[in-house]
Image (cartoon, rainbow, N blue to C red):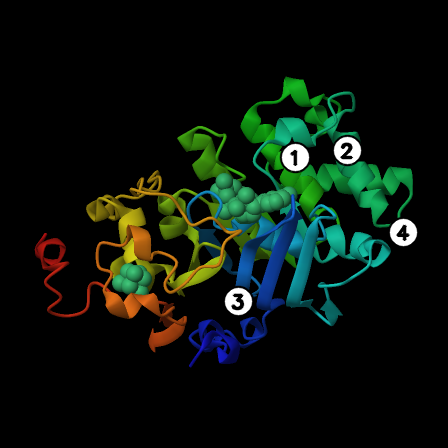
């Protein structure tokens, strides 16, 4: 099976009938930027589904297309971006949607929480008023009802002393509290999908864990599909249901989190994991640094995009490997996957 004909395996393995329909279906998403007469191919044919109440993690080195891919869904790219493919949420096709319609989708269908809440919040406005404003932006409620709903949302995200904090300004809150406020704003119109793009990266490890627990709780209670974008493998391993690994604008490996971290197949993922045994106790496991640089996305890529940095490359890798489901619900794009039974390249790790 290739990427385009991918079945909903992630859903099939889940017995819960209501979780079988994806809320978001992305197919062959492509994003290019025109820059100084050059075309940057930032996202090169990405397909995936996001399911209610489940967390999908997208990991990969800097510049692999994680943020551009999700920003494309929300119409948050600059005019130099050209987006193709399909991204359906409910009955709505997001690719090509005009700004007025996209404004209605943003927040009510899909919302995003970014890394730096200090920059996203208005420093001159009390945080409760900012949440209430987000509630009112989606219509149908007066000022008083919006304020009441804002307090409810601040309680939902477990902001300590929500009623009192309602009147405080962003600088009076800790980084973790500000991120809770951003999540409350994200949830103001009950989106089906919540995207957290490095939303915990700026926080200390303890606060990071608390925010991740909050996201898990919200996805369970509200049935929200969460897309977690992170450099932190520990977070993906600990909290996500499914993981996509991106390289040079493509998905190169994709599986259930448990399967992926137990049975890495793609040499790129293998290299990212670096000291693999760390994943036995994962809470904070940054990506390993891999020798060499990702390819220049403004030049044509011939063969496997990871080939110049891959320790296992052979002549066969001059032909690009397609992303295929080689094992049950485990897709990877590689001619020489690692870690298969008897593989001498990874036998040493198996023995540990
Ligand atoms: N406005 C833009 N104009 C031109 N190229 C861009 C623009 N925004 C992003 N890119 C390019 O698109 C590619 C993907 O960028 P993206 O921000 O998605 O990476 P990322 O995986 O989110 O990285 P990070 O982990 O650093 O956030 C990069 O090569 C980047 O330089
Ligand atoms: S296809 Fe070849 S170059 Fe690419 S990751 Fe696999 S072994 Fe390495
Ligand atoms: Mg990014």
Up/down of 193 relative to 205, above or below: below
The CA distance from mark 3 to mark 2 is: 33 Å
Q: x%, y% of residue 22?
A: 58, 70
Looking at this rendering, what residue extends furthest in the top direction?
A: 172
Kindly state the secondary structure of the residue where label 2 is placed: helix
Q: Earlier in the sequence, mark 4 or mark 2?
A: 2
Q: Residue at x 89, y 38 (%)?
A: 143
- The tag earlier along the polypeptide, 3 or 4, is 3
Residue assigned mark 2: 130
C-alpha separation, residue under disc 2 versus residue under disc 1: 9 Å
Q: What residue would you read off at disc 1?
A: 181
| Residue picked out by circle 4 | 140
Q: Decide which of 171, 301 is in the foreground and name it.
A: 301
Neighbourhood count class around disc 3 (C-alpha, 10 Å): few under 14, some 14–19, many 20 upward? many
Observer-nearest of 307 and 65: 307
On the picture, is 43 further left or further right than 75?
Answer: left
Q: Which of the 4 image quadrants contains residue 156?
A: top right
């Amino acid at each position: 099976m290739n990427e385009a004909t991918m079945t909903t395996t992630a859903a099939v393995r889940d017995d819960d009938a209501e979780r079988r329909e994806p809320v978001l279906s992305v197919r062959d998403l492509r994003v290019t930027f025109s820059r100084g007469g050059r075309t940057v191919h930032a996202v090169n044919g990405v397909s995936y589904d996001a399911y209610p109440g489940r967390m999908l993690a997208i990991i990969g080195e800097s510049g692999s297309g994680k943020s551009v891919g999700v920003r494309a869904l929300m119409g948050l790219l600059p005019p130099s971006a050209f987006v193709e493919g399909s991204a359906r949420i409910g009955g709505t096709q997001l690719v090509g949607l005009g700004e007025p319609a996209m404004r209605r989708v943003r927040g009510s269908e899909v919302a995003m929480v970014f890394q730096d809440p200090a920059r996203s919040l208005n420093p001159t406005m009390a945080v409760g008023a900012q949440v209430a404003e987000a509630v009112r932006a989606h219509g149908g409620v007066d000022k008083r009802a919006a304020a009441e709903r804002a307090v409810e949302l601040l309680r939902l995200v477990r902001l300590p002393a929500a009623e009192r904090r309602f009147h405080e300004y962003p600088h009076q809150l800790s980084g973790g509290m500000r991120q809770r406020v951003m999540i409350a704003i994200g949830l103001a119109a009950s989106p089906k999908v919540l995207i957290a793009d490095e939303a915990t990266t700026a926080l200390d490890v303890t606060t990071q864990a608390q925010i991740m627990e909050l996201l898990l709780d919200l996805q369970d209670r509200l049935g929200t599909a969460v897309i977690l974008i992170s450099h932190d493998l520990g977070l993906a391993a600990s909290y996500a249901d499914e993981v996509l690994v991106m390289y040079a604008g493509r998905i190169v490996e994709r599986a259930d989190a448990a399967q992926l971290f137990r049975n890495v197949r793609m040499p790129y993922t293998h290299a990212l994991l670096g000291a693999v045994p760390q994943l036995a106790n994962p809470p904070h496991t940054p990506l390993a640094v891999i020798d060499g640089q990702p390819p220049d996305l403004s030049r044509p890529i011939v063969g496997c995009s990871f080939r110049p940095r891959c320790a296992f490359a052979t002549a066969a890798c001059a032909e690009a490997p397609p992303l295929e489901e080689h094992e049950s619900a485990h897709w990877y794009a590689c001619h020489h996957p690692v870690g298969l039974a008897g593989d001498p390249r990874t036998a040493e790790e198996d023995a540990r």
